Amino acid sequence: MTPNLKNLHPYPFEKLNQLKKDIIPPIDKPHIALSIGEPTHETPHFIKEALLQHLHGLSNYPTTKGLPELRLTIAEWIARRFQIPSGFINPETQVLPVNGTREALFSFAQCIIDTTSGVSGQPPVVIMPNPFYQIYEGAALLAGAEPYFLNTLEESAYLPDFDAVPEAIWQRCQLLYTCSPGNPSGSVMSQASLEKLVALAEKYDFVIASDECYSELYDDEHNPPTGLLQAAFSIGNTAFKRCVIFHSLSKRSNAPGLRSGFVAGDADILHGYFQYRTYHGCAMPLPTQHASIRAWQDEQHVIENRRLYREKFDAFITVLADVCTIEKPPASFYVWLKIPLDPEGRRISDTEFAQQLFAHENVTVLPGSFLSREFNGINPGINHVRIALVAPLDECIKAAHRIKNFLNTLNHK
C-alpha cells in the first residue's frame, strides 16, 4: 500500500464521534445535529421526477464525458451566472460532469501533481486555506505533495492573505485550492483578490482549483459571489488558463444524494483530466444526468432555498445576539462562532464547548480545530465552533435557545 496513507489525519466527524462517545446527553431534549453540512431542505419534485422518468437509462453505460445536453446546459448556466458572454465556455472542451465535487476535488490533485518536477529535490506544494475542507489536504498528501496552509483569521475577515506566501513556496506550488464562499466561515473573496490570484498562477505557473460549491447560498440577493472564471475573464484570460471551477447540486439544489456536479475551465487541463477520468471509472449515471439538466435549468428553487436559509440565520442570530458576538456571514449555511469569554475573561476550548454543549443540551456542533492544522504557531480553528444551519427552522430556533442557555450557564459558573 502507498506509504502516503500513513500521513492522512482522521476525518473531522470520526474525531467528533470519539469526543462524544462517553457522554450521555439529556433524554428529555431531542438531539439536534448542527455539525454536518448536509442540506435537509426538500429536493425539488421536478428533479426527482426527471430521475424517475429516465430510469430506463440504467441499461446503458454512461460515458465519462457525459451527455452533450448536460454539458451545454452547464455551459449556459456558467455564462448566465458569472456574466461571461455566450460562446466563451465551450461545452465540448471546457466542461466535465462529476459525481459531486468531493470526488473531483480529490482526484484532480492526483491528475495535476507531478512529483518528478519538484524544485531542488523538494516535493511540490499544494496551497490551501486553513481551516479547510479536509479533502484538499488528503488529496495533496496522497498525490505526494506537501500541503502549505494559509491561515484565515478573524482580523483578515477569515480570508486568505496571498501576500503572506513566501517566494520559495510560490516557486514550488503546482496546485492551489481556494474555497469561496468559504467553509467554515462563509467569507467571500472579492473580485480583486481572485484577479490577483489568477495573475499569481500565471506568474508562477500553478493551477487554481476553485471550490465554489456554496456559491449559490448567499445573503444579498443582488450581490452574488464572484467566481474564478468570472474574475479571469475580466482581466483578459478568456481561455481561463490555469483556472478550474468545481460546482455541485448538493447545496444549490438540496440534492446531496444525487452526487452531481461539474468541473469547468482551462480546456488543456480538462483534456488531461478527462483522460484520467476515463481510467478512473467515474461516469455519471444517465438518470442522474437528466435530473441534473433539469436542476441547472431552474433558478426559482435556488432563490427559495436562499430565502429559507436567510430565515434561519435571522431567527438563530436574533436569539443569540445578546449573549455572544454573532454575525450573519455573506454566504454559505454555516455560523463560524467564536466562543465568547466568560465574565472573568476566560474561554473554554472548542472541544470542551462541543462536549459540554452536547452533554447539557444534546446539540452537536463541530469544534473548529477539527477543521484546521497548526501552522506558523497558530491553529486558526481553535476558539471557534462550526454550526451548520441545515436543520428545519424550528429545530434551529430550539438549538439557538439551548446554546443560549448553555452560554448563560458558563457565564454563571
Image (tube, rainbow, N blue to C red):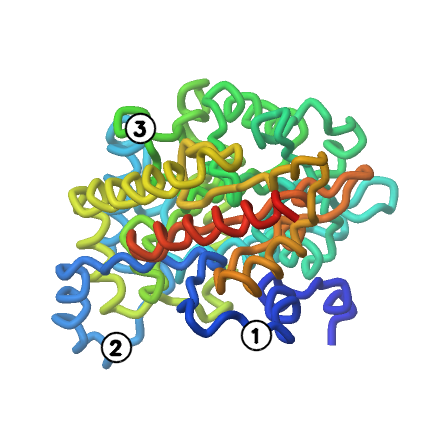
Give the Cα separation between the discs numbered 1 and 3: 41 Å
Estimate the x, y position of residue 16 in percent, counting from the top left: 61, 64
**Placement of 171 over or under 134, stated as above or below:** above
Circle 2: residue type: Asn
Which residue in the rendered view is the most extreme toward the front?
A: 412
First reached walking from the N terminus: tag 3 or tag 2: 2
Residue type at tag 1: Ile
Q: Is residue 303 left or right of residue 185?
A: left
Q: Which mark is residue 24?
A: 1
> Residue tagged by mark 3?
220
In the displayed structure, 10 sits above or below 263; it is below
Q: Which image quadrant is residue 144 in? A: bottom right
- Residue type beneath disc 3: Asp
Q: Is residue 261 at least partly visible in the picture?
A: no
192 or 104, which is in the foreground?
192
- Which label lies toward us, 3 or 2? 3
Could you tell me residue 260's position as x and y percent?
Answer: 34, 59
Query: Mark 3: which secondary structure?
Result: loop
**Image coords of residue 132 (percent x, y):** 60, 47
